């Protein structure tokens, strides 16, 4: 392994995801150092979230240094560390305020609407008639018209 005009590559050949790789003479005299990259599982461990969360965040562009190679995401370790440090600083400064109640995707439900939905569900569960205009009421009416003919 390794040796030759490019120098010793044994560390890179043993584990291509660890350390840096000096391209040496491969680029006509220009030396390029590739940053260390990690895969989704390691990024998830470092961030303290699930692998799926890392994939979603990377897909949205929330994680700097993310690159999708084939079907796998890889991450620049230096940029991921900087991202974590930035988030830690935001927390320390109090910039990550909690989301106000009712500010999500769905509008907040009123107590009256919740109570009405509960009463209708209980009525249906007991075998009573559904509210006028509901799907089951329309179905019963259509069946009654068909049986009357």
Image: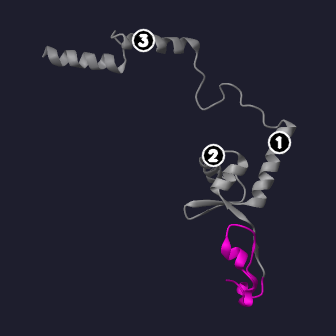
The front one of 130 and 94 is 94
Earlier in the chain: of badge 2 and badge 3, it is 2
Which residue is denoted by mark 1 in the rendering?
A: 90
Q: Which marked residue is nearer to the observer: mark 1 or mark 2?
A: 2
- Which residues lie in the magenta part? 1-30
User: Among all residues in the image, which is located at the extreme bottom?
Assistant: 5
Picture layout, residue 100 above or below residue 129: below
Picture layout, residue 141 above or below residue 18: above
Report which quarter residue 72 is drawn in: bottom right
Q: Which marked residue is nearer to the observer: mark 2 or mark 3?
A: 2
Secondary structure under tag 2 reads: loop
Number of marks in picture: 3
User: Among all residues in the image, which is located at the extreme left?
Assistant: 149
Q: Does the magenta stretch include residue 25?
A: yes
Secondary structure under tag 3 reads: helix
In the rendered structure, the answer to whether residue 61 lies left or right of residue 121 reads: right
Rendered location of residue 9, percent (x, y):
72, 80
**Residue 122 — which label?**
3
Q: Residue at x 84, y 35 (%)?
A: 94
The front one of 128 and 80 is 80
The front one of 147 and 71 is 71
Rendered location of residue 127, percent (x, y):
33, 11
| Residue 53 seen anywhere in this rendered image of the structure | yes
Which residue is denoted by mark 2 in the rendering?
A: 50
What is the distance, in whole Å, between disc 3 and disc 1 at their CAs?
47 Å
The front one of 79 and 11 is 11
Picture layout, residue 120 above or below residue 69: above
Picture layout, residue 93 above or below residue 134: below
Rendered location of residue 138, percent (x, y):
30, 18
């Amino acid at each position: 392994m390794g040796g030759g005009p490019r120098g010793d590559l044994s560390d890179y050949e043993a584990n291509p995801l660890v350390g840096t790789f000096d391209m040496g003479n491969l680029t006509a005299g220009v030396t390029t150092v590739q940053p260390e990259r990690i895969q989704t599982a390691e990024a998830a461990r470092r961030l303290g979230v699930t692998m799926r969360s890392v994939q979603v965040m990377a897909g949205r562009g929330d994680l700097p240094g993310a690159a999708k190679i084939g079907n796998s995401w890889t991450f620049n370790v230096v940029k991921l560390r900087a991202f974590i440090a930035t988030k830690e600083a935001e927390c320390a400064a109090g910039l990550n305020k909690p989301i106000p109640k009712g500010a999500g995707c769905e509008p907040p439900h009123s107590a009256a609407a919740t109570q009405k939905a509960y009463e209708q569900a209980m009525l249906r569960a007991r075998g009573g008639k559904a509210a006028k205009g509901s799907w089951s009421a329309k179905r019963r009416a259509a069946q009654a018209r068909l049986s009357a003919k």
